[in-house]
Image (spheres, rainbow, N blue to C red):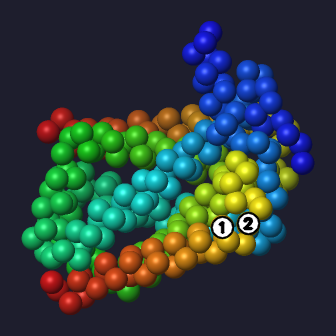
Amino acid sequence: MKNFASAYPAKYKVGMWAFVLHRLTGIGVALYLVAHMIVISTAAVSGTLSFDGVMETLRRPWVIALELVLIAAVLYHLLNGFRLLLFDVGVGIRSQKPLFWGLMAAGALTMAFATAALWPLMAG
Amino acid sequence: MAVAERLSGMAGRIAGRQAVAGTGAVSWLMQRVTAVLVAVFIGVHIWVLHFTPEATSGSPVTFESVRQRMASPWYLTLDFLLLASLLYHALNGVRAVLLDWGVGARSEKMLTGILFAIGVLSFGYGAYALIPFFSGK
């Protein structure tokens, strides 16, 4: 097993940063999943009124803004994961950099759409 | 420069000691299979709950709206598949990261067992949390 991962971070290129970011978003979204399950499930088993109250709280503008951050993390993980799946079937390995930036452009477009769609809820 | 060095040091620690530790063929394959499932299911999940015209026009999620959604066997199936595939993908991902960091490398079976138990318990709690939408309280 090569031991290059932490040896020279200063020399990381696109692929290595893509890997680090894949890990970060993976850990982040996994931690979010814990909070999501606790908050939503506990609200659900605590009765109708309490569930509706929690859902009302989750519609505050700052929560919607955080949701966009979450969507960005999920989207990054999904798009970069798609790139990894392509590599697994032998597609795009030689053009991994343009593939990465192409997918990031698709992600940026999706985020622009998501932000525009949720804007009315954030503006209040 | 100190900040840049710090950041790259952190990146190195996140990446792990090993490029990618051997996690096993089943673990590797299942991570790909569940990745595709989660990508589809989470797309539907986020779309339905946040981006339908009703959601973006500001009508809140309520107990009643979830109850109606859960009355559809399609959504119910989708939710269970999402719960199962996402729990597997998340916990198997955590396992890979921990093994890369050298945590549990010497007691891999125990690490796998603990994560498996967390997965089963979480699935059980997720299923339990749906009961009110069928009993109506």
B104 w.r.t. A46: above or below: above
Q: Quadrant of residue B75?
A: bottom left
In the picture, which quadrant includes the C terminus of chain A?
Answer: top left
**Same chain letter for marks 1 and 2:** yes
Q: Position of B39 compared to B48: left or right?
A: right
Disc number at residue B91? none
The CA distance from mark 1 to mark 2 is 6 Å
Identify the residue shown where x is 80% and y is 67%: B24
Identify the residue shown where x is 30% and y is 71%: A41
Q: Quadrant of residue A80?
A: top right
Q: Position of residue A84 (x, y in %)?
A: 73, 50
Tag 2: amino acid: Ser
Q: Chain of mark 2?
A: B
Tag 1: amino acid: Leu
Identify the residue shown where x is 65% and y is 60%: B95
Q: Position of residue B16 (x, y in %)?
A: 72, 42
Disc number at residue B111? 1
**Label 1 crowd bin: few (<14), some (14–19), many (20+), radius 10 Å:** some
Q: Nearer the viewer, residue B63 or B26?
A: B26
Check if mark 1's residue and mark 2's residue have beta carbons within 8 Å: yes
Identify the residue shown where x is 17% and y is 68%: A51
A69 w.r.t. A42: above or below: above
Q: Nearer the viewer, residue B44 or A57?
A: A57
Q: Position of B49 compared to A105: left or right?
A: left
Q: Which residue is mark 2?
A: B107
Q: Position of A6 compared to B70: left or right?
A: right
